Amino acid sequence: MSSVSVKTVQQPWASMTSSTDSRVKAARVAVLDDDPRIRTLLEDELLDLGLTPHLCGTALDLLQLLQEHSIDLVLMDVAMPEVGGLECLIQLKQVNYQGPVVMVTAIDDDTIRQSCLQNGAREYVLKNELFDRLTDLLNTHLQLTLTSS
């Protein structure tokens, strides 16, 4: 008889009030990255946490998504073909997106970091740190967004 391993995921939202808890668990997170492997990894993590991920491969995909769905948080790559993350941040302001945007990148550059933060990004996270920080990022930005709405 073979043994089956079950992965138990501790919900990071346990410290929130019950009224907020169900709203956070139902949060919609857009992932904008041109690398399908990164999108899939983030999708798996977000699903494990009980969130609803929406995957976008281009800035145009994200802008279309925002016309069709309410999104609570955007995780966005910086370096992408056609429209990069910084340009997309500016476009998000033009379409009046009010939710938090966290830049997720492999580029460790203070000038780019400052440009992103000055143009509306809430945080700038290196991809090699992302999965270690993901739960804290979600707690911080989703709790602020959903309790202020």
Image (cartoon, helix red, strand yellow):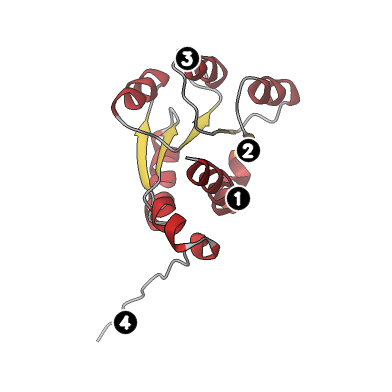
Residue type beneath disc 4: Ser
Of labels 1 and 2, earlier in sequence is 2
Q: Which mark is residue 25?
A: none
Pointer 1 local density, CA inside 10 Å: few below 14, some 14–19, many at least 20: few
**Inter-mark Cα distance, 1 to 3:** 26 Å
The residue pinned by badge 4 equals: 3
Q: Is residue 97 above or below residue 94?
A: below
Of labels 4 and 2, earlier in sequence is 4
Marks 3, 4: nearer the viewer: 3
The residue pinned by badge 2 equals: 125
Q: Which residue is located at x 45 percent, y 30 percent?
A: 33
From the top left corner, tell me how far across and down residue 46 is, in percent. 42, 50
Of labels 1 and 4, earlier in sequence is 4
Q: Which residue is located at x 71 percent, y 23 percent?
A: 114
Q: Are marks 3 and 4 in contact (CB under 8 Å)?
A: no
Q: Are marks 1 and 2 in contact (CB under 8 Å)?
A: yes
Q: Which mark is residue 133?
A: 1
Q: Is residue 47 above or below residue 5?
A: above
Pointer 2 local density, CA inside 10 Å: few below 14, some 14–19, many at least 20: many
Residue type beneath disc 1: Arg
Residue type beneath disc 2: Val
**Inter-mark Cα distance, 2 to 3:** 19 Å
Secondary structure, mark 4, is: loop
Of labels 2 and 3, earlier in sequence is 3
Secondary structure, mark 1, is: helix
**Inter-mark Cα distance, 1 to 4:** 32 Å
Q: Are marks 4 and 2 in contact (CB under 8 Å)?
A: no
